[in-house]
Image (spheres, helix red, strand yellow):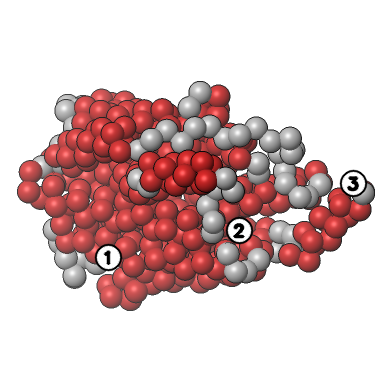
Amino acid sequence: MPSGAANSGIVRDMQNRWLAPFLNLGHLLDHLAMLVFPTAVVAIGREWGRPYSELLPLALGSFIAFGVFAIPAGWLADHWSRYKVMALFYFGIGVSLFVTGFAQTPWLIALGLCFVGAFAAIYHPVGIAMLVAAPGRMGRALGWNGLWGNLGLASAALLSGALVDAFGWRAAFWVPGVCCVLAGICFLILVKDPGQAKKSSKSLGLHVDARMMARIFSIMLVATAFGGIIFNSTTISMPKVFDERLSALTQSNLGIGALVAVVYTMAAFAQVVMGALIDRMELRRLMIGVGLVQIPMLWLAANLEGWAMLGVALLMMLAVFGQIPLNDAIVGRYVADEYRARVLGIRYVVSLGVAAVAVPMISTLHRTEGGFANVFLVLAVLACGVSVSSFFFPSRAELTANREKLAAQAG
């Protein structure tokens, strides 16, 4: 390589040394913002004298927006600027959270949460596309990014619980909102625009034919849809589940948030492990294994309380969190860079849009005689669907044969 090109590459790397850290921070803030309300809703219900089953549906619009706006966010990023759209993410989500903290009626909370969801929708199609643009080890990059996202889930429960106990539920929106805006300012100062993806002469799918690509993405979308409902349902309901099932261990908002945070933080490392496995093992085996672990854990969660429930919750979330990098790895491995934000947008529309049914499902089933037991049993059935679909994902041998067939035809 000429010395000028080498020096240019070194300078570019030095300028972008903050890119991955800010993408990881963005993942943390994204999930933190979406789960402030599910923790604060317990305190809001007590202050306003409203039942949980009545207030939780206020979050429905935010989760619908979280999914629906992923496609326009991906399109805008690919056609305008991924860097600028990510800056919009930080400022938009921060202002939306801060304003929601001033709501005086349930409907104003619902409106504020819709804006939070719309700006939060930016992260996954845009941030993940920037992350997997050219990593040396994609699985490792996705694994650590997933860890930060799950730390956002954990910090949402812990931070919101602490702020609610110390200053009231409104502070649970104000403080993260200010943090997001400050992160946006630092992003613009420290991170240089890496530029857009280079156009490729290759087709949307890499190294496999159209039929194999259709099979891969059909299975991915089934796993994405069912897995999204499982992920959303478990993370949304966990604070209330612990409030009901672990009353012998703690009765404060901070105590509940701390227990949820411990579970999420420990389970988050499943993504780091999964990221390392993605770089070493075929995706089919990993998808099957994760699905098979989820089923018994969800069934046990339907029937346990106290310390036993806490232990099962940890194992259950290990399996739930471990699935997340797998679907992103499919996109990173089989989709050309200039299309990734749009394809990821479609994936997250399915994942997060379908997952929005978690809110009315939890609200409805919580009112039934079984309560959360019925919620976990439904999720166990969905986990069966994820596991069955994974058996149809092409093996490494099939993918190799398909590539050789394409190479022979090209020759």
Across and down, in percent, residue 346 comes to: 58, 37
> Along the polypeptide, which appears first: circle 3 or circle 2?
2
Question: Residue 96's mark?
Answer: none
Amino acid type, mark 2? Val
Front-most of residues 385 and 195: 195
Q: Secondary structure at mark 3?
A: helix
Across and down, in percent, residue 385 comes to: 62, 58
Instruction: Give the CA separation, mark 3 to mark 2.
Output: 35 Å
> Along the polypeptide, which appears first: circle 1 or circle 3?
1
State the residue position of label 3. 410
State the residue position of label 1. 262
Position of 98 compared to 360: left or right?
left
Taking the view exactly as shown, the residue that stands out farthest to the front is 3
State the residue position of label 2. 386
Amino acid type, mark 1? Val
> Along the polypeptide, which appears first: circle 2 or circle 1?
1
The image quadrant of residue 260 is bottom left
Instruction: Give the CA separation, mark 1 to mark 3.
Output: 53 Å
